[in-house]
Image (cartoon, grey):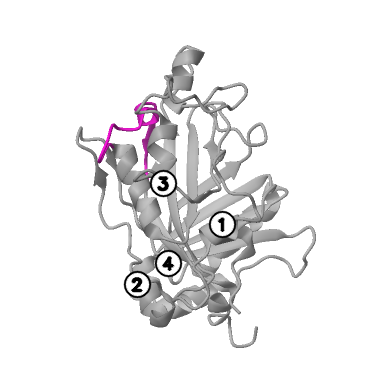
């Protein structure tokens, strides 16, 4: 039986590090993944650190052809809406997420990963994530309200048994920078209309007061059906330069693609929240099962 990388579902860590790597032209992809897999948490199930590894979809298909969903694809080109608003494509080859109770552990493992991969890959981007008021984003609204419970999340996140890539997941990773105080300067009622929820109590606006371009309207449903993804979003940055890391997992890549298309205004109004935050990056990664990753372990491990 295939089992998922447990870090996808591990909630509560305070410190996070995200690293995206691009392979050097002469690098052997299989050896590169082996080097990354060898960088891992201490051999302990308590007080340790969680690690999640993702691989560029086309690269994973080349490395493990029988273990990739048929429709899996890279973030190949920018996604542009009718008014010109664009989500950039910044696809890298490897993605790793370390999460722990304190940042020193994350820092050390990130440093180990960069050192281990230096002969094979260059570090394209690094982000440090952290929690804000338990589960709020930096516009001070609750994030992940529509997430499934942990009991139900595997059905949303994981490719079913018997299918190529079983117990793996498709990840969408984006960095969104907030436009300074533009959103904070709005009246609370206007902020709530942009988001589609009340700020204090996190109650979804009723149908009569829900704007068609609210964030809720553009991200909670696809073709009239509930949008089922598992968000692990979190804040990043400093007081002067900060935003949101979008970290979305799904068993079907189509859900994530349609989410982006709806946000830019394809098939409806553009998401009002995108007027106050700007996407800087965009990439898909396939997050293989634990057993699939083990096939890349060093021979003596």
Closest to the observer, 66 or 239: 66
Distance Cα–Cα, label 1 vs label 3: 31 Å
Mark before the other along the chain sequence, 1 or 3? 1
Task: Name the residue carrying label 4.
Answer: 121
Mark before the other along the chain sequence, 2 or 1? 2
Relative to residue 190, is residue 45 depicted above or below?
below
Q: Kindly check if marks 1 and 4 are in contact, taking CB atoms under 8 A apart as contact.
A: no
Q: Nearer the viewer, mark 1 or mark 3?
A: 3
Quadrant including the N terminus: bottom right
Q: Element at badge 3?
A: strand
Q: Nearer the viewer, mark 1 or mark 4?
A: 1
Q: Name which residue lies at 66% across and 59% down.
A: 50
Specify whether 125 is left or right of 230. left
Mark before the other along the chain sequence, 3 or 2? 2
Residue 155 visible in this rendered orientation of the protein = yes
Q: Name which residue lies at 47% across and 79% down.
A: 31
Label 1 CA crowd tier, 10 Å (few <14, some 14–19, many 20+) = many
Marker disc for residue 97: 1
Mark before the other along the chain sequence, 4 or 3? 4
Marker disc for residue 70: 2
Marker disc for residue 225: 3
Quadrant including the C terminus: bottom right
Q: Nearer the viewer, mark 2 or mark 1?
A: 2
Q: Whole-percent x and y of residue 93?
A: 39, 64
Relative to residue 175, is residue 60 depicted above or below?
below
Q: Whole-percent x and y of residue 100?
A: 69, 52
Q: Element at badge 2?
A: loop
Mark before the other along the chain sequence, 1 or 4? 1
Q: Kindly check if marks 3 and 2 are in contact, taking CB atoms under 8 A apart as contact.
A: no
- Queried whether the magenta region covers residue 276, the answer comes back as yes
């Amino acid at each position: 039986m295939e089992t998922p990388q447990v870090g996808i579902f591990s909630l509560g860590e305070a410190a996070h590090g995200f690293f995206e790597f691009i392979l050097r032209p002469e690098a052997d992809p299989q050896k590169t993944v082996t080097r990354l897999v060898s960088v891992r948490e201490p051999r302990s199930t308590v007080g340790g650190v969680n690690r999640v590894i993702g691989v560029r979809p086309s690269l994973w298909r080349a490395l493990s052809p029988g273990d990739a969903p048929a429709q899996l694809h890279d973030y190949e080109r920018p996604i542009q809406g009718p008014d010109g608003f664009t989500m950039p494509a910044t696809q890298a080859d490897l993605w790793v997420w370390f999460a722990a109770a304190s940042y020193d552990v994350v820092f050390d493992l990130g440093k180990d990963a960069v050192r281990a991969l230096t002969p094979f890959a260059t570090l394209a981007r690094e982000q440090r994530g952290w929690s804000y008021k338990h589960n709020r984003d930096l516009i001070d609204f609750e994030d992940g309200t529509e997430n499934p419970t942990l009991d139900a999340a595997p059905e949303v996140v994981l490719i079913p048994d018997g299918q190529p890539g079983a117990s793996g997941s498709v990840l969408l990773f984006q960095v969104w920078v907030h436009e300074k105080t533009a959103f904070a300067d709005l009246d609370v009622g206007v902020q709530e209309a942009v988001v589609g929820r009340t700020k204090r109590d996190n109650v979804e606006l009723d149908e009569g007061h829900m704007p068609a371009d609210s964030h809720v309207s553009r991200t909670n449903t696809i073709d009239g059906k509930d949008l089922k993804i598992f968000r692990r979003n979190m804040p990043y940055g400093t007081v002067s330069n900060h935003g949101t890391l979008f970290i979305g997992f799904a068993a079907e890549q189509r859900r994530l693609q349609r989410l982006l298309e709806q946000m830019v205004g394809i098939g409806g109004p553009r998401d009002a929240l995108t007027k106050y935050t700007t996407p800087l990056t965009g990439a898909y990664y396939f997050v293989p099962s634990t057993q699939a990753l083990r096939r890349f372990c060093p021979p003596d491990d």
